[in-house]
Each structure stands twice: as C-alpha cells, then as structure tokens.
Image (cartoon, grey):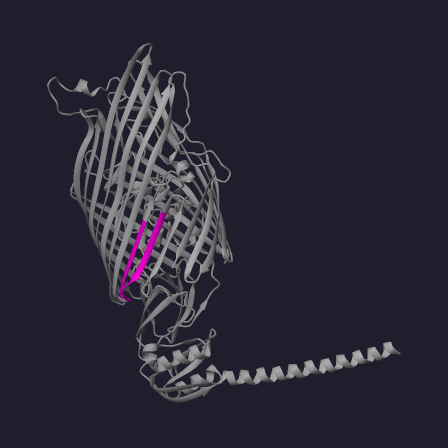
Amino acid sequence: MKLLMETKSGSNQRKSSDKYFIFLFLCLFFIFHFSSGFAQSSSFSFSQTNLSDALVQVSQTMNFKVAFDSKALAKHQVSGTFQAKTPEEILTGLLKNTGYIAEKKFGNYLIIPTSPEKVVQNLTFYRISGLVTDRISGEQLPHAGIFLPGQNLFLTSSTNGTFTFRIPAAKSVQIRIQYIGYQAVDSTLILSDTTVVFTFRMKQKNMELAPFQVRKVRLKMIDQNKEASHSTINPVGFVNLPNMGETDIFRTIQMLPGVGYAEGSSGLNIRGGTPDQNLVLFDGFTLYNLDHFFGTFSSINPNVVKDIQIYKGGFDSRYGERLSGIIDITGKTGNKYSPKIYGGLNLISGNLTAELPFSEKLTLVVAGRRSYADIYSSYLVDAMLENQVDATNSPSRPSSIVQLKPGFYFYDYNAKLTFSKSEQEKMSVSVFGGKDFLASVGEGKIKQSYSKTSNDANWGNYGFSLSWIRQWRENFFSNLQVGYSGYQNQYSEQTEVTTQKGKKITTDLFDTYEQNELNDFSASLRNEFAIGLKNSLDFGFQTKYNEFTYLKNAGTDAYYSDIANSSLLYSTFLQFNTQRIKNLTVKLGGRINGYNLSEKLYYEPRLSANYRIGDWANLKVATGRYYQFLSKVAPTQSYGYNRDFWVIADDDNHPVLSSDHFIAGTTLTYNRLSLDAEFYYKTSNGLQLFLYIPPFQKNVDPSKFIPPGQAKKIQLPSKFITGAGSATGIDLLLKYESSRFTSWIAYSQSKAVRNFAEINHNEDIPAPFDKAREFKWANLLTLGKWSFSGTWIYSTGQPYVQNQTVDKTLTAVFTYNRLPDFKRLDLAANYNLQIQKVRIKLGMSVINVLNQENYNDIYSRDFNFDTTTFNETTYVRSLGISPNFFISFQY
C-alpha cells in the first residue's frame, strides 16, 4: 500500500513537472518571438544625406550586402524617417522616386536603374577601368589575372595594379579576378555610365562597388601562367616550408621544374644555363649577386617582396639582356592605413621590417637582416661553416686532405618610399644594399708536404631605382624607371707549402689577389596601349651603361689579367598582343639592340602563343632570339668560394652571347589537379672560360719572366677561350591544391653540353650544372593554428673536373666525373598564436632528416715542384641532419 501511494505521488510530481516545463517553454518562445520581431524592426532618420551614404549605413546596421554605383547614387539626396523590418522594405523606401530599384542576385542586393535600356541607348562601347588592391594594407597588386567569361577575354593588371577594357554596351558584365595568395573574386559589374572605374579590394567581404562571391580558398603556392615557361609564386605561402634559417625566395624557385636545386648556391641554374644568364630585377634595377652565407640565403629579403614573375625561357620582347631566364620582383609599397612592424630570429640571423604610413598617399618600408656568426656561433652555424672534406688517393698522383676553418657574416638592407598621387599615378624610390665577409684557413698534409692556405674575401651587391608610373588614359599606361646597381668582389689568398725531404726543408710561398667590380646605370620607359577589346601594344625604350674591372695577380711580381672596359647599350621593343581569334592568344614582337663596342645592331624576334581548349586544357608555344652583353667567366683551377667574375662583351676578346629558344607545352586541369608539361631546346654561343697555368707549377716562376734590373710586373700565360653549347629537356609539374593541403611534384629530364676548341679537342663536355634527372616533391598541410610541411629532393650528380692539364700553348685536357646523387628529406612544423595585437609564429625545421651524405662542390689544385708533385682536392659536403628553430612576429 505504501509502495502504491509513493508511486502515485511520483506520478503526480512528474505531471506537475511536465506542466512546468511546457509553461516555461511557451513563455520563452513568445518572449523570443516577440523580441525577435521587435529587433528586426529598424528606424533610420536622414537629412539631406546622399543616397550612397544612406545605403552604406542601412546595410551595415541590418547586416546585408548591397552593390551600387556610388558615384551615380551620390547625386541623389535622402531626407526623412524610414522604418523597416526587412532589407526589401528599407531599400524600397530609400529608392522611391530615384529611378533605381533593388534586385537580389548572388545573395546580394544590386541597385540598378529602373529603365537600364535608356542608359545604354545610342551607346556603342563601355570603357571599364579597375584597380586591384590588398583589402587591409591598400597595396596595389601587380600582374593580377582578370577573366571576362562573357567575352572570353584574359587580361593582366599593370605594375600599378590597374587594368582597362572596352566592351559593347550592356547593363552588366561578369568578371573574375585572381591573385596568387588571395581569395578569387567573382563579380557582376553594374554599368551606369560610358566610363566607369571599379576598385577591387582582395579578400574584402563587403564590396561597395560590385557584388561578389568568395570561392572556397585553395592553398595556392605556384601559378603556371598560360604563357610558356611563365610562373608566379606566392611569397607569403612559402614561409611554412622547411628552410635553413628563414624563408628564401630563390630556394622556393629552385623547387620548380627546370630550375636546378643546389644547396651550396642560391643562384638559379635554369635549363642548363648558369646564374649569370638570368636577369634578376628588383623594382627595376639589376641584381648581380644572389648569394649570402655560402649560398644558404639569397640576397633578397622575403619580407619586402610583393610579387615575383618567373620566366624560364621564351620570354617576350619586353625583356632582354640575358640568355636563360627572367626573375622580375616587385617590392612592397607598405601599409597605407596603419604602421606595421614584423621580424624574426633564428639560429643564423635576425631580421626586422617596418611599414610606416605618413599618410594614405605617402608610405615607407624599411628592412634589415644580419647574421651573427661572428658574434655567436650556434651549432647550425658551425655545421655550415665547417666544410667537411674527403680525399681520393691515387698511386700516381697522391691527393692532399684539406680542412677549412672559416669565419663569416653578412648583412643587407632595403628601403622604399612611395608617393601615390592618385590611383592613376605613383612615384617611388627603392634602395638595396648587402655585403658578405669571409675569412678562412685551410690546412692539408700528404706524405712529406704540408700546405696552409689563408683566404680573405668580401663581396657585395647594391642598387637604387626611381620609378614613375602613370595611367594617362583608360587604355594607355606608362612606367618610367631610372636605376643604378653594382657588384664588387675582392679575394686574396696566401698559400704556404712546406716540404721535407730528409733533413732538407723547403718552403714555397704563393700570393694571389683578385678583384672584380661592375657598375650598371640604366633608364627605361615601358608603355601599354589597349586597342579595342582584344588587342594591345607594348612598346618602350631602354639605355644601359656598364663599366667593369678585373684584376688577377700572382704575387707582387706578376699578373694574369688586368682589364677594364665600359659599354653603352640602346634597346627598343615593340610587341603586338591579340586575342582576336577565339581561345587563341598571340604575342608577336621584337627587340633591337644597338651596342657601341661592336658598332652593330642585334635583332631579337619573339613569338609566343596559347590556345585554350575549354577550361581543362591549353596548348602553348614560344620561340625567340636572345643576346647577352655582359656575363660571368669561370676560371679553371680556381680555389675557394665565388670564383667566377664578370666581363663586358667587346666583340673581340669577349664576344656577345646569343641563344635561340624553342618551347612547346600543355597544361591540363581536372578539379584540384593540374599537370603542366613543357619540352624545350636552346642553343648558346659565345660561352667563355679563363684558362691559365696556375702558379703552383715549377715552370711558372714569376721571377724567371722578369729581365734583370726590371721591376715592373709581367703577364703570365692566360687566355679567354670561347665555345658554344646546347640544352634539351622536358619539365613536368603535377599539382594538387585544396583549402588545407597542397602538394606538387616537379620533374626534369635534361642534357646540357658545351664544346671549346682548346678543351678535349672540341669534343662535347658537360655543362657545369648539367643534371640528367631531378625530382622534387613538396607538401604543405594546414590544421587550425598548425602547419606541417615536407620536401623531398633527388637529383643525379652534377659534373666536376677530376683532372686537368694545361700546357704552355694553353690547350687543355679535362677528365670529368660526377658528384654522387643528391638525396634529401626536410620536414617542418609551425604554430601560430596571437597575444593581443601581436601575431607570433613558432617553427622548427629539420634539414636532411635521413642524414644523407651529399656533396655540394669540388675544387682542386695541382702542385708540381722539383721536390714533389701532388694534387689537392677539396670536397665540400652538404649539411647532415640539422634542426633549426625560429620565431617571427608581426605587430
């Protein structure tokens, strides 16, 4: 009975509880319902407010997107009080009797004329201009891709971020804008006047001038452009890849197919060429040395880079002066709206950058980097500076084992001041400088001989440019640049060889000194002129004055070479670009060079074409003639780092270099996958080497060449020899890109050869950076605040001269061998966090995770004395397993 009563009581309690919760739910529902209804009702009061400002205010308050022509709607005034619960109600009230209506499209409200037909009546064409900028900093973005689906038209924004096109009269036009590292923007432009100007602020969610849809952002790192051998890389995205100390732009470029990877150099060996055969432009001036810290870093600070355009060959007539490739780098102009400071520290160096806006029109960017190995040497610095060696002994010619003990540091700086007079006109001054210092001692011993070599070297790079960019009309753009840059390299070496034979000890002392200096003064004017919708002209002029000196001494009594020269180069180019035929883009142009030292004209015809097969494929071809008027010469039997030197072509001792390019390829795209394949063949003429009999020979005693009583220096046997070369190969790039993960495989198969009449009887010899195969695989995964990455690099070994003999007639016999195959796996992990207004990135990279034994370089010297003969060969190993840590910040 008790149990039944308790059960009944529990049942009553549950019913009472259910009624209570039902009542509470109904109360909350009505409270929420009515409060929501009241919250949706908004009231606005305006007094002589222009319609454009009123629309901005109501859209922000009621949280909806609206697109309109602000210039046209600003002519209408709004007064009164408006109350509405929905966007449709408020827009109807505001637009009453204005001649405009609101139309919902793509989730946005478009404000369009009620009778758009009247607007376009009697009009033939609309001229549309645009400006592409960064939504936060206001930086104008150059080389952005613009696609008009309705007209099947592709455009590229200028170096000032502007573009112009003309279309038949219409109410609206669809446009898509892409810029690597930014969100793609799809937009519908509402046309209300014959000439309209739109500003596209990339990544901005609310856009006042045009409705847009932001597509799901892919982690895009490399963009293979529709032109043959043209690529764009995302300098921001590569910060998460494994690195030696900090992000390096040229290491990133080396991950592309057709660009040889070299741990011991930041120089770019493009399709069998040498680094000096590439034109590297930074804000219009030429950079002549790209290495810091034994090639660990490039001389370009990634923190000041905004845009990088890469041409591996077949480049159009806007560019000249080089045989292999073009690297065109545009520096940042700085944040227009607020100061920004960022930097970083790692086990090798530190860096600091500041963007300072004095106003929205005047900005300054300053940056500096310095290594501190001379102050504090970390384990990574010690590993990098310690050039480990090995030896290969031969019974007939024993080899010396050499151990190097170097000390080293570098610094560089950048500054850029930009004045934006308007969106159509901008002026800037850009300054760059950098220098490296090296001191090393090498000791070696073999049998009864002991050698000690001391080296001191310093080399530097510097540049300055003044740029004026002007959009004269919607279809006419000009870029005027004046620049100065230069390179200097000083190298001194003292070698002491002590030989003991029985009780007799002999000592031979050898001193050498090299100095190379190059100066470059340039001025250029580039123009772009649009002709109708699908045609345009590029034309311009350039003049360049170069001067150089090169001195190579052998002690105080003799020299090998002491030369100096200067040159003046005039160039003009013209290029016609057309998309007249559907899906076909053609660039036809030429370049004419006048050179004072040869008193000749050099003609460079250029042609490239791209045929689009739907959205999934395109075919591309390019060909052209290329000339080079200054180049680096490699001396034989040189010892140490940075051995090559610059010379100016004089059409006598130093010929003008020439090359012909032939390129064909295709790009295939399927969803997130893309495959780019290119075949190339190129020839080279005018290549040079510097042959000389080294001072470490018994038949080269400087004192024997000096007549009695004569104290002046005499010239030892040396000779510049000239030859030719060719390169052929295929480059493949397979990419996968998604929002969190990107991966690409770069594969190259190639052969590059040279021939010289004075070497091996004019037989083909391998080019210095020839590699039969190269495979590079990069992966990047982003998970929340973490990012993980890895790279795998494999390449066949590059050639080196194992033995060489040079006789008195300066005819040589070289025996070649190859370095072992190069294999390396690198991994990295980074973590991002924010403390108030400071963003911090913590990261770790492990270089050569599998601790593979790789070699970067080999150089050797032959010693031939009356008492002994031996060969000294230095094998420079790459790093073993090497962890590196860094921290970077942004405020």
| Range drawn in magenta | 350-368
Q: Main secondary structure of the magenta part?
A: strand
Work out whether residue 142 or residue 706 is closer to the camera in this orientation and state it.
Answer: 706
The image shows residue 752 at horizontal and vertical percentages of 37, 36
Residue at point 15% right, 20% down?
706
Vertical comparison of 614 with 375: above or below: below
Q: Quadrant of residue 206?
A: bottom left
Q: Is residue 865 left or right of residue 651?
A: right
Work out whether residue 154 or residue 57 is closer to the camera in this orientation and state it.
Answer: 57
- For this orientation, the residue located farthest to the right is 1
Image label count = 0
Q: Is residue 755 magenta?
A: no
Work out whether residue 237 or residue 881 is closer to the camera in this orientation and state it.
Answer: 881
The image shows residue 49 at horizontal and vertical percentages of 34, 84
Is residue 648 visible in the rendered image? The answer is no
Vertical comparison of 557 with 307: above or below: above
The image shows residue 563 at horizontal and vertical percentages of 18, 34
Is residue 260 visible in the rendered image? The answer is yes
Residue at point 41% right, 49% down?
665
